[in-house]
């Protein structure tokens, strides 16, 4: 089975900061790693699909990339509405989540 | 616009049963495979079960296999999860999610708002 490690588990950042979150897979695999944002009490929302494709309606400050087994979600300039928990997903497996809160 | 609306969550005693529903609207329900994903309080997302477009194929996480049954009624645009032999560790918000893609290459583009299942005596 492919193992997936999401890091960090949490981070504190300020509005305007550049934020990166990583999911590392245990082997080279499908590029269909996806990223979701979840705010407290709400359902997850798709941000990025297939590693680097921005879902319709998602702001362009969100981007995704892949290098080998490392998949990265980047928020280029953190906005107040971006404080949330972020999950990666590959097949039936979800990452453990990264909580982004205010520094 | 696509909408998924779950219902059926409740407080149930250990060993009890419950049926969740997910009503879909705004698109052709029958062309999409569907999943159930759950989230225990304060925890991450966990895949529970999946069903193919016409219901011929179903999949279950090991943690629910033999206890839960997923089904769908495309004439009613509704997905179901029949839950039995419930345990306290089944306590979670249950989301239905629409799958786009096939094989191991897919994502979930729409999610319901979730329905809370609490298993406790």
Image: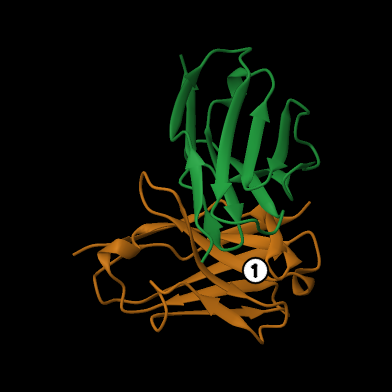
Horizontally, residue B53 falls left or right of residue A2, namely right
Rendered hue of chain B is: orange
Chain A tint in image: green
Residue A35 image-quadrant placement: top right
Query: How was this image coloured?
Result: by chain
- x and y percent of residue A89 in the render? 59, 52
How many numbered circles does the render carry? Answer: 1
Q: In this figure, which residue is indicated by the disc labeled 1?
A: B34
Towards the viewer: A103 or A3? A3
Q: Nearer the viewer, residue B48 or B11?
A: B48
Identified at 64% across, 37% down, the residue is A72
> Which residue is located at x 60 percent, y 23 percent?
A19
In this view of the protein, which residue sits in the foreground, B88 or B8?
B88
Q: Residue furthest left?
A: B121
Picture residue at 54% right of the left edge, 54% below the top:
A26
| Residues packed near mark 1 inside 10 Å, few (<14), some (14 to 19) or many (20 plus) | many
Left or right: residue B121 compared with residue A3: left
The front one of B17 and A30 is A30
Quarter location, residue B68: bottom left
Q: Is residue A63 left or right of residue A28?
A: right
Q: As displayed, is residue A92 above or below residue B59? A: above
Provide residue B92's location: percent of width, then percent of height: 39, 57
Tell me the quarter of the picture where residue A2 sits: bottom right
The correct choice, above or below, for A37 with respect to B64 in the image is above
Instruction: Name above or below for residue A89 compared with residue A57.
Output: below
Q: On screen, B9 above or below A22?
A: below
Residue at coordinates 26% horizontally, 77% vertically from top-left? B15
Tell which subunit mark 1 falls on.
B
- Secondary structure of the residue carrying numbered label 1: strand
């Amino acid at each position: 089975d492919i193992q997936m490690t999401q890091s960090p588990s949490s981070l504190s950042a300020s509005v305007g900061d550049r934020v990166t979150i990583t999911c590392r897979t245990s082997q080279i695999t499908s590029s269909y790693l996806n990223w979701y944002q979840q705010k407290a009490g709400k359902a997850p929302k798709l941000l990025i699909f297939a590693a680097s494709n921005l879902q319709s309606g998602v702001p362009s400050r969100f981007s995704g990339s892949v290098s080998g087994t490392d998949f990265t979600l980047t928020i280029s300039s953190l906005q107040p509405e971006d404080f949330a928990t972020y999950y990666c997903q590959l097949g039936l497996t979800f990452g453990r989540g990264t909580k982004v809160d205010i520094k | 616009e696509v909408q998924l609306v779950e219902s059926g969550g409740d407080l149930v005693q250990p060993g009890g049963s419950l049926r969740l529903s997910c009503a879909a609207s705004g698109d052709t329900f029958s062309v999409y495979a569907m999943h159930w994903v759950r989230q225990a309080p304060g925890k991450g997302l966990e895949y529970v079960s999946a069903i193919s477009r016409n219901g011929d194929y179903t999949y279950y996480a090991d943690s629910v296999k033999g206890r839960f049954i997923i089904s769908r009624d495309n004439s009613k645009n509704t997905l179901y999860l029949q839950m039995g032999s419930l345990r306290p560790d089944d306590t979670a918000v249950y989301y239905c999610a629409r799958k786009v893609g096939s094989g191991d290459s897919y994502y979930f583009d729409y999610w319901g708002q979730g329905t809370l299942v609490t298993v406790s005596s």
